[in-house]
Amino acid sequence: GTAVRLGPPGVQVGARAARWSDVASLAAVRGRLGRSPRLRLTRTDGGVSEVPFDEIAVFPATLDSTVRAYSGGRCGVDLEQLDS
């Protein structure tokens, strides 16, 4: 299936989708036990969905700038965990 889908209405990460107004956060999180980092969508209702960055065909910075563009600057991807 689709790992990540972005558009003017909102974002889909894995099986979960959210309108931009329902996104609490988009962030890189460390993988567990040698697994690759993951992109985590957290919705304002507490729902969470994750996909490994290995399944995303663009660079993390490109993903962040695309999220910022589609969300009108309301959201971005916190990439801090990828730096360490």
Image (cartoon, rainbow, N blue to C red):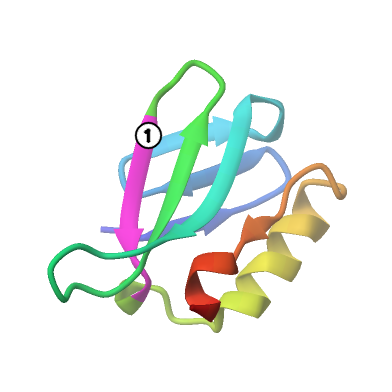
Image quarter where the N terminus lies is: bottom left
Q: Is label 1 in a helix, a strand or a loop? A: strand
Asked if the magenta segment contains residue 50, the reply would be: yes
Reply above or below: 69 against 60: above
Question: Residue at point 56% right, 76% down?
Answer: 60
Reply above or below: 57 against 5: below
Q: Position of residue 58 (x, y in %)?
A: 52, 81
Question: Residue at point 87% right, 47% down?
Answer: 72
Q: Position of residue 5 (x, y in %)?
A: 50, 55
For label 1, the residue is: 48
Q: Nearer the viewer, residue 26 or 63?
A: 26
Residue stretch in magenta: 48-53
Q: Is residue 4 visible?
A: yes
Question: Residue at point 69% right, 57% down?
Answer: 67
71 sits left or right of 51 in the view: right
Which image quarter: residue 74?
top right
50 sits left or right of 22 in the view: left
